[in-house]
Image (cartoon, grey):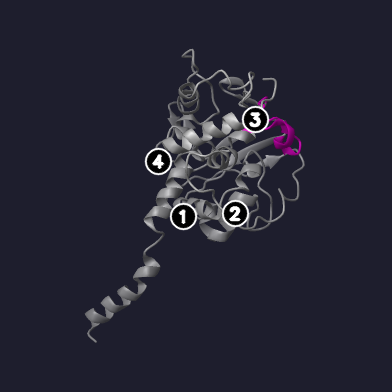
């Protein structure tokens, strides 16, 4: 065999291994990370005009309060995750455990992310491996509150619901991927109160914009009962109230605006299925 033919033969053998993730897996990961999950809302540095160009997912200070100072790490291929296996990165996203066994603290929404399906988790990891590397050192977070040893037992197999405009699909997006319910449920020392306060609101966010209280998004009169679907879509994707006034951060309107129409409709269907709760 000539050297040229030998080289071609070797490339042919190596081709499948070097091909990288399938395009549909990357597309799904991109949609989730840049869409309903809104990962850049915490992980992308912000400047006076918004997200800093060329620094997508490079990390930033997210929260500094009496309980903790939390930095979202650099999750581009130039960050620490470059040395983690796909399995280790998957575990960090869904269970909050680093490869060394240490726990990742709040505000990463692990109560929600534990429900991410295996297929979507693989897509998220594949896409994170593909984003442009951004060189930026990010300090470690520090916690002045006790953290639990774990957020729960190891997560086993998780299936995604069949796609479609269904309550099950809306629940999967709102409760797990977009973690809407984590912010829109009362927060307790043990985490969001899904048992008795799912969607009731009341969680207080403080930032440069002032103070934002997550509203009640259950189906009752204190929630979304008086809003039609068009009004809800404008609030979720544009941050615009029915009276035209602008809503405040930290809800990631720009990311939620990337939701596919069917997914947005499924979320609204799910919210209308939530038992009515009073208050907020």
Q: What stretch is highlighted in magenta?
A: 183-202
Front label number (4 vs 2): 2
Give the left or right position of residue 22, taking residue 211 as reference: left
Q: How far apart are marks 4 and 3 (CA)?
A: 36 Å
Q: Is mark 4 on a helix, strand or loop?
A: loop
- Residue under label 3, please give it: 199
Q: Is residue 196 above or below residue 215?
A: below
Residue at x 56% of width, y 43% of height: 138
Circles 2, 3 touching at the beta carbon (< 8 Å)? no
Pick the quarter of the image with the N terminus: bottom left
Circles 4, 2 touching at the beta carbon (< 8 Å)? no
- Residue under label 1, please give it: 126
- Residue under label 2, please give it: 158
Residue at x 54% of width, y 53% of height: 80
Which residue, as the protein is rendered here, is positioned at the far bottom? 1
Q: Does the magenta stretch include residue 267?
A: no
Which residue, as the protein is rendered here, is positioned at the far top? 243
Q: In this view, does 18 lie above or below 277?
A: below
Q: Distance between the residues labelled 4 and 1?
A: 20 Å
Pick the quarter of the image with the C terminus: top right
Query: Which corner quadrant of the image does residue 190 belong to?
Result: top right
Q: Distance between the residues labelled 2 and 1?
A: 18 Å
Front label number (2 vs 1): 2
């Amino acid at each position: 065999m000539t050297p040229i033919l030998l080289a071609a033969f070797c490339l042919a053998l190596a081709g499948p291994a070097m091909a990288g993730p399938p395009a549909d897996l990357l597309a799904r990961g991109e949609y989730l990370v840049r869409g309903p999950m809104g990962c850049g809302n915490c992980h992308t540095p912000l400047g006076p005009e918004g997200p800093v160009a060329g620094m997508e997912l490079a990390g930033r200070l997210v929260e500094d309060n009496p309980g903790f100072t939390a930095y979202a790490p650099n999750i581009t291929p130039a960050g620490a995750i470059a040395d983690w296996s796909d399995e280790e990165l998957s575990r960090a996203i869904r269970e909050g455990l680093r490869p060394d066994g240490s726990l990742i603290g709040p505000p990463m929404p692990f109560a929600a992310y534990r429900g991410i399906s295996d297929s979507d988790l693989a897509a998220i990891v594949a896409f994170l491996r593909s984003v442009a590397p951004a060189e930026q050192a990010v300090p470690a977070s520090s916690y002045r509150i006790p953290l639990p040893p774990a957020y729960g037992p190891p997560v086993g197999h998780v299936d995604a619901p069949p796609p479609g405009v269904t309550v099950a699909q809306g629940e999967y997006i709102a409760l797990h991927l977009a973690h809407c319910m984590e912010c829109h449920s009362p927060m307790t020392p043990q985490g969001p109160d899904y048992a008795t306060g799912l969607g009731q609101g009341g969680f207080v966010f403080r930032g440069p914009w002032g103070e934002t209280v997550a509203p009640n998004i259950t189906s009752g009169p204190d929630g979304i009962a008086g809003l039609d679907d068009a009004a809800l879509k404008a609030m979720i994707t544009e941050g615009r109230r029915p009276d035209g006034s602008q809503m405040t951060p930290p809800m990631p309107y720009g990311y939620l605006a990337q939701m596919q129409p069917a997914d947005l409709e499924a979320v609204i269907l799910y919210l209308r299925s939530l038992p009515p709760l009073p208050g907020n």
